[in-house]
Amino acid sequence: MGAAQRTGSGSTPEETEGSDAPGPGEVGDSARRDGAAEAPGSRSPGVGEPGVEPPLMRRLRRASASIPEGMWASYGDVGAAIGTGARAVGTMLATGAGFTGAHRILRADGTVSEGFRWADDGDDRDPRSLLVAEGVVFTGAGRAARICRMEVDELRALISAPSPPG
């Protein structure tokens, strides 16, 4: 089955673990390591420049694309694996475009976020039905089974694995 894409949840995940602060080695647009404000036009290359994706967004893209069919991960576990919090993951998914496998990122209770939407507004596939077709098992209460859930350490291992050639 081809890779699915979505823009994100459209709502804030109900998880609160983690922090929305910049990840290790990242700073805000106008911050310097010594705490002094940067002069206008003196930003590091790629920080706040149009068309340049921030490192945290690149890590999220890799994480969402790394979750295999038949598995799912929570917003909080993905956040912990990439160095941010659940809310930041939800916000990036909701505001970014075309995250492969992002339908596999669910709320901590194993449910699809109520505000889920695909990157293509015309895409009317049901994310839960797609997950079932990929092999994710759901309980009678409508929650993805824990046996199909990827944990933080598993996500970190997948994210840090070398990318396949080509």
Image (cartoon, rainbow, N blue to C red):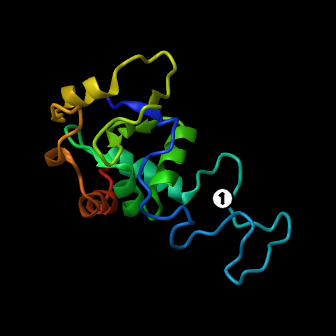
Query: With 57 as the anchor, is 35 left or right in this view?
Result: right
Viewport quadrant of the C terminus: top left
Residue at 33% x, 27% y is 127
Q: Is residue 166 among the parts visible in the rendering?
A: no
Q: In which quarter of the image is residue 154?
A: bottom left
Residue at 32% x, 50% y is 165
Residue 44 image position (x, y, % from top left)? 70, 67
Residue 129 image position (x, y, % from top left)? 26, 23
Q: Extreme right residue here?
A: 40
Q: Is residue 148 among the parts visible in the rendering?
A: yes
Query: With 31 as the anchor, is 101 left or right in this view?
Result: left
Q: Which amino acid is tagged 1?
A: Gly
Residue 54 vs 40, above or below: the answer is: above
Residue 33 vs 101, above or below: the answer is: below
Query: With 96 as the anchor, is 146 left or right in this view?
Result: left
Residue 39 image position (x, y, % from top left)? 85, 71
Viewport quadrant of the N terminus: top left
Q: Report which residue position mark 1 lands on.
A: 46
Query: With 94 as the anchor, is 161 left or right in this view?
Result: left
Q: Extreme front residue here?
A: 141
Neighbour tally class for label 1: few under 14, some 14-19, many 20 plus, Cα within 10 Å: few
Residue at 35% x, 38% y is 101
Residue at 20% x, 26% y is 133
Of the pair 164 and 41, the residue shown nearer to us: 41
Residue 99 image position (x, y, % from top left)? 44, 39
